[in-house]
Amino acid sequence: MIQTLDTDFEGYLTDTSNLDGGYADRVYLPETEEEVGEILRKCSQEKTAVTIAGAGTGLAGGSIPFGGVVLSLAKLNRIIEINKEKGLAIVEAGVVLYNLHREVESQGLLYPPDPTEQGGQLGGNFATNASGARTFKYGPTRDWITGAHVFLSSGEMLALSRNGNRANRYSMSVESVNRTIYDIEIPRYQMPPTSKHSAGYYAKPNMDLLDLFIGSEGTLGVVTRLALKLIRKPERLFSGIVFFESNERIFGFVDEIRERSKKNRISDTPDLNARALEFVDAHALEFIKESYPSIPENANGGAIWFEQEREEASEELLISHWAEVIERYTDLSDDSWFGLSEKDQQRMRTFRHAIPSSAYEFIKAHQVQKFGTDMAVPDNCFHDMYRFYRDELDRSGLRNLTWGHIGNSHLHVNMLPENQTQIAQAQRISDRFVTKALQLGGTVSAEHGVGKIKTKYLKQMYGEEGIEQMRKVKRALDPTAILGRGTMFR
Ligand SMILES: Cc1cc2nc3c(=O)[nH]c(=O)nc-3n(C[C@H](O)[C@H](O)[C@H](O)COP(=O)(O)OP(=O)(O)OC[C@H]3O[C@@H](n4cnc5c(N)ncnc54)[C@H](O)[C@@H]3O)c2cc1C
């Protein structure tokens, strides 16, 4: 008997975006893959819309239903295998990221993707191609998926493995476990050259079919099981939160660390090689100052949180390299925070997480809207983009705070308008930000996905023709159009 909720399921009608008005007839809570297939077969026959729900930490409204039913993966939450020798984990899609990290790390292993929010499910991370601080070194979720079970809306299952099914230029065929053949035409648009990208279907000639489903935001299939790559957990870390007096100096520092880290990825010398490089602006520091009174008064340029993996033998040399660069770019090095112990490092991660989560709490408590960006631009355009953000924000007089993944030239600029006039103003500014990012060759979403709130931006990015090519992919895999209605495109 499949578990369902027919009343009292408000929690499934929202996520962390501002989108409200969600409604549904029922929530399904399958406990096995067979049940997922059964639900989809039934919904397909009845043409009932299905919205797939992970943990609901998404920021784009993808898991919010507008009619039909919700299919929650919460009960498919087993870690099936962790294989140390092969560096492999097999998990069900409803496993919460935090639980996976805790489990693999207790065995001396590391699953590198680390979205700031650890309460999301692996299936949600797969569906949004989530990224985190360590993406600077290790890439997004996509790079760590080696296989998946995906259920199509027909109820049939695809068993996918990395390199198991590649396109021939722009066309590919895939056979389900039940031997139905699906023919797919790969879209021909060019994805942006940014180091992170999570907007629209992944599309490249000769691509791997697995990549089409990663980042497809619950519009092509339900992922139920994942195979993940693991690596050895680094021996130790060196990390810090460094405060700066001015923007010029903080960005000079970032440029140098970014370039040296990229160069040193392929070298064995113990030099700067950050795995995380994250920015917090002065407004965001102000926002959490009450909880962190030791933030220096004159940190007007903001702060950088960094992490680097290290080995005991080369520790001193490495720290001296960091000290040299830090002292060259800031007079606040003595007021900055550094950590060699796990406890200190965890404190710094908590500090970084406190910024978005305090902002979301503030929004809830004060019933204000938030306009947040998720664009990334190519590294050589970052300064241009940041100047544009700053000029617009300073001119607007709106309350704002910015944080994010500066190593990947990807910031979350957040505006908190307080009345209807300001809301309209924030909307116009958001539109201008998107246009500027696209002019610079950027993406409209680097990690949160398009969901239901950025569909117009996706269209702006790829044009009607690009959207039509995506619709064609969807028609091939979801001919009854029941999955993720209203997400990505209409
Ligand atoms: C404080 C905070 C910080 C955050 N920081 C980051 C960050 O650093 N990086 C980042 O990438 N994101 C971040 N996020 C956003 C969010 O955590 C991610 O988007 C996450 O991947 C969503 O996972 P979820 O399980 O909550 O998915 P949900 O919100 O439930 O769903 C997201 C989308 O995935 C689809 N989906 C979910 N499960 C499946 C499945 N099994 N099969 C098919 N489709 C599915 C849904 O239909 C929906 O379209 C943050 C969120 C918060 C609240």
Image: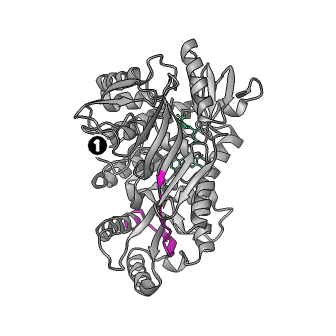
Amino acid type, label 1: Gly
In this rendering, does residue 188 appear at all? yes
Q: Secondary structure at mark 1?
A: loop
Q: Nearer the viewer, residue 464 or 219?
A: 219
> Which quarter of the image is occupied by the C terminus?
top left
Q: x, y percentage for residue 136?
A: 40, 59
Name the foreground residue: 55 vs 288: 55
Residue 327 rendering spot, x and y as whole percentages: 42, 79
Kindly identify the residue that appears in the image at 50 percent across and 74 percent down.
237
State the quadrant of the N terminus.
top right
Q: Image height check: is 258 above or below 33? A: below
* Residue topped by disc 1: 441
87, above or below 48, in the image = below
| Residue under the image location 24 percent in, 31 percent down | 170
> Where does the magenta region start and end?
228-250
Q: Relative to residue 204, is residue 443 drawn left or right? A: right
- Relative depth, front residue between 292 and 272: 272
Residue 330 lies, with reference to residue 374, above or below; the image says: below
- Which residue sits furthest right? 8
**Quick check: can you spot residue 395?**
no
Along the horizontal axis of the image, is 343 left or right of 375?
right
* Rendered location of residue 87, percent (x, y): 47, 61
Decide: is 172 above or below 240.
above
- Quick check: which quadrant has ligand 1? top right
Picture residue at 63% right of the left edge, 59% below the top:
288
Q: Residue at x 57, y 65 (%)?
A: 105
Magenta segment includes 249: yes
At label 1, counting other C-alpha atoms closer than 10 Å, the crowd grade (few under 14, some 14-19, many 20 or more) is some
Residue 301, magenta (yes or no): no
